Image (cartoon, grey):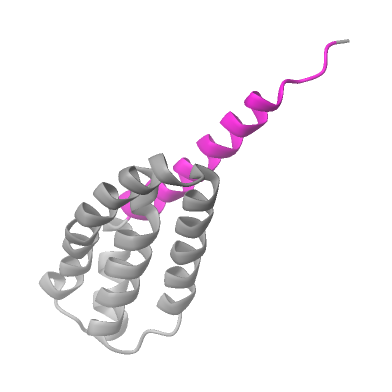
Amino acid sequence: MKKLHYAWVVLAAVMAMNAVASGLRLSFAVFIDPLVEQYGWSRGGISLAYTLQFLAAIPVVLGAGWLGERMSTRRLVLGGSVISTIGVLLTATVTQLWQFQLYYGVISGGLGTAVFI
């Protein structure tokens, strides 16, 4: 029996990480109504976090492309995973709208998952 080539393992890991990162970014609409009900925040304020994801991701994507050529892509993706995880964990401590916008929008979405793009 042939042994599974390591490239297939890497491909499966990248696909799984990309699926999680995309799910984190693109499932945002599910959170709007519960956040409005629980905290009483405006839809516009909550949606600003989603906008901040994309605005913060612009320089990160450009920098990640540059860094990917100069250092190990493995380290870059691992760093993005750690930053994204920290942002999601911080989101669990949110009590103010600005915290949600910073943790979810900038840290988790903008800085963390942008390296997967």
Q: How many discs mark residues in the rendered view?
A: 0
Q: Nearer the viewer, residue 84 or 28?
A: 84
Relative height, residue 81 to residue 8 (above, below) = below
Instruction: Name which quarter of the figure residue 60 lies in.
Output: bottom left
x, y percentage for residue 54? Answer: 20, 55
Place of residue 45 in the rendered image (x, y in percent of width and height, measured from the top left):
14, 75
Task: Classify the position of the C terminus by image quarter.
Answer: top left
Q: Residue at x 30, y 83 (%)?
A: 99
Q: Is residue 6 magenta?
A: yes
Q: Is residue 39 magenta?
A: no
Outermost residue to the top: 1
Residue range highlighted in magenta:
2-27
Answer with left or right where residue 47 lies relative to residue 117. Answer: left
Which one is in front, 50 or 1? 1
Instruction: Pinpoint residue 70: horizontal percent, then vertical percent.
Output: 41, 44
**Residue at 44% from the left image edge and 63% from the top image edge:** 84
